[in-house]
């Protein structure tokens, strides 16, 4: 089995926990892309078999989240896991739908975001959260992000919570976005809930929970029908068909001179069987991922 299965991660599971669990269920080599914090839920693409080799093609995908922002309290980590370090009143404007929509819209577009101190970004060979835990101060460089769209979903006046949906670029920290939104609303806040509903072309509607996968395997149901094949993942790439002679060279790792304009191709044999992915270097086609 080679491809990707989309797991709908539940709370308290780390991304590594999910990888290990799926591996134990399907008895195949596994990996993942797009780490989710334990308290976050939603789309976690799990790479299966030779699908583990395609992660390099999937690292820059845009993402969509549904976030719940708790107003009036700030935590040291920016999410529900941290202890409360500040409290502030919540203005009535925060319950005005049109006003909140206006504030949210100011975050659309490109901007510089300072990553949260409780993150795994490395500075001088050390992760930021390690500095935070040791009480050390460290200068954090802002990073360019892009918010493509941000929409208000709900305002809960009883709980002082705002729920919104955001589509953003890779590297966007929603915890920090929540804090920045709260600041623009003249208060403080933290990310109470986070669900990822999309990463690239992988949507939560196509996902499966771990217990569902486990039940399918236990019942001898064909779980592979939930898998996206490598051929499907690269469906937007052009294809090239090789005759027997060229195919033998391709499989042996020999570069083949072909009149190709793009950098990545789906490769097929002369019987129209999908063989794998080829890349073009210096005008020649070479093997990259072989599934046979």
Image (spheres, rainbow, N blue to C red):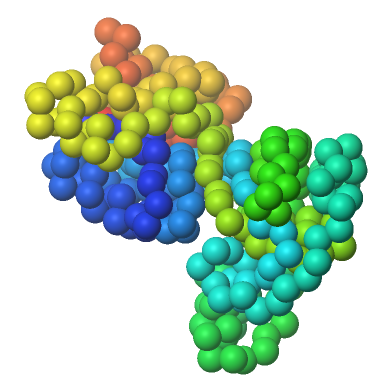
Q: Position of residue 106 (x, y in %)?
A: 88, 47
Frontmost residue, 74 versus 115: 74
Say left or right for 9 vs 270: right
In the image, residue 172 above or below residue 225:
below
Q: Is residue 233 visible?
A: yes
Count the numbered circles shown: 0
| Residue at the spot 70% in from the left edge and 54% down from the top edge | 160
Say left or right for 121 vs 86: left
Q: Is residue 270 visible?
A: no
Q: Quadrant of the C terminus?
A: top left
Q: Position of residue 42 (x, y in %)?
A: 46, 41
| Residue at the spot 78% in from the left edge and 70% down from the top edge | 88
Frontmost residue, 132 versus 236: 132
Q: Position of residue 55 (x, y in %)?
A: 43, 45
Say left or right for 158 vs 286: right
Q: Position of residue 111 (x, y in %)?
A: 82, 54
Say left or right for 13 vs 79: left
| Residue at the extreme top of the image, as rendered | 271
In the image, residue 266 above or below residue 57:
above
Frontmost residue, 126 versus 160: 160
In the image, residue 13 above or below residue 47:
below
| Residue at the spot 10% in from the left edge and 25% down from the top edge | 219
Q: Quadrant of the N terminus?
A: top left
Frontmost residue, 84 versus 7: 84
| Residue at the spot 71% in from the left edge and 77% down from the top edge | 86
Occupied quadrant, residue 248: top left
| Residue at the extreme front of the image, as rendered | 158
């Amino acid at each position: 089995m080679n491809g990707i299965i989309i797991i709908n991660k539940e709370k308290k599971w780390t991304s590594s926990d999910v990888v290990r669990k799926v591996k134990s269920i399907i008895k195949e080599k596994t990996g993942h892309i797009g780490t989710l914090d334990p308290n976050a839920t939603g789309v976690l693409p799990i790479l299966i078999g030779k699908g583990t080799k395609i992660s390099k093609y999937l690292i820059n995908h845009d993402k969509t989240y549904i976030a719940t922002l708790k107003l009036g309290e700030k935590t040291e980590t920016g999410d529900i896991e941290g202890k409360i370090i500040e409290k502030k009143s919540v203005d009535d404007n925060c319950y005005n739908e049109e006003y909140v929509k206006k504030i949210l819209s100011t975050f659309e577009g490109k901007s510089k975001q300072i990553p949260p101190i409780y993150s795994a970004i490395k500075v001088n060979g050390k992760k930021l959260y390690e500095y935070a835990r040791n009480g050390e101060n460290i200068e954090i460089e802002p990073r360019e992000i892009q918010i493509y769209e941000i929409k208000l979903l709900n305002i809960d006046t009883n709980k002082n919570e705002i729920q919104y949906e955001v589509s953003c670029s890779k590297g966007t920290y929603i915890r920090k976005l929540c804090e920045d939104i709260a600041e623009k609303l003249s208060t403080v806040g933290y990310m109470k809930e986070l669900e990822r509903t999309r990463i690239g072309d992988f949507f939560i509607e196509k996902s499966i929970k771990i217990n569902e996968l486990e039940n399918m395997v236990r019942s001898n149901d064909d779980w592979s029908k939930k898998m996206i094949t490598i051929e499907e993942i690269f469906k937007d790439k052009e294809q090239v068909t090789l005759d027997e002679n060229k195919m033998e060279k391709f499989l042996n790792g020999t570069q083949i001179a072909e009149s190709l304009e793009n950098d990545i191709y789906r490769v097929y044999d002369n019987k129209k069987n999908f063989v794998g992915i080829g890349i073009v270097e210096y005008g020649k086609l070479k093997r990259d991922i072989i599934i046979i």
